């Protein structure tokens, strides 16, 4: 039988897991910022350059040629 107690327990467990995951992501983000001299904008610029490079390498060329 699924009781209110079980529902509440599952909800609390799910919330604890979400909080733990969020804390891990926060720590990883802080570490990444520190690796880039403590500048968040520098980290964002680094990620943007990586994303552009990855996109370029997947597509083969930057822009498709018109038909």
Image (spheres, helix red, strand yellow):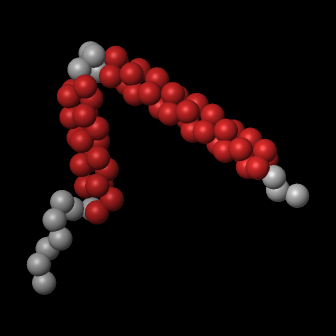
Quadrant in the rendering for residue 64: bottom left
Name the spot of residue 9 as percent of width and height, x first.
74, 41
Q: Is residue 43 above or below residue 61?
A: above
Describe residue 9's horizontal placement relative to residue 45 as left or right. right
Looking at this view, name the residue that lies furthest to the front: 4
Of the pair 25 and 18, the residue shown nearer to us: 18
The answer to whether residue 67 is visible is yes
Give 61 or 13, whichever is nearer the viewer: 13
Q: Residue 50's x, y, as percent?
A: 29, 41
Looking at the picture, tell me which residue is in the foreground, 19 or 40: 19
Looking at this rendering, what residue extends furthest in the bottom direction?
Answer: 67
Q: Residue furthest left?
A: 66
Between 40 and 61, the one lying in front of the other is 40
Q: Say which quadrant the C terminus sits in.
A: bottom left
| Residue 27 coordinates in the image, percent (x, y) | 46, 23
The relative height of residue 28 versus residue 13 in the rendered view (above or below) is above
Q: How many marks?
A: 0
Identify the residue at horizontal 82%, vertical 56% (top origin): 2
Residue shown at the point (27%, 16%) measured from the top left: 38
In the rendered structure, the answer to whether residue 56 lies left or right of residue 1 reads: left
Write the residue at 88% across / 58% down. Answer: 1
Residue 37, compared with residue 66, is above or below; it is above
Give x and y (percent) for residue 14. 65, 42
- 29 horizontally vs 8: left or right: left
| Residue 50 left/right relative to 32 | left
Res. 28 in view: no
* Residue at image point 51% right, 28% down: 23
Q: Residue furthest right?
A: 1
């Amino acid at each position: 039988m699924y009781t209110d107690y079980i529902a509440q327990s599952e909800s609390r467990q799910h919330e604890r897991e979400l909080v733990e995951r969020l804390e891990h992501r926060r720590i990883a983000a802080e570490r990444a910022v520190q690796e880039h001299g403590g500048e968040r904008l520098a980290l964002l610029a680094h990620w943007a350059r990586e994303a552009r490079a990855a996109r370029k390498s997947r597509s083969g060329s930057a822009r498709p040629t018109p038909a």
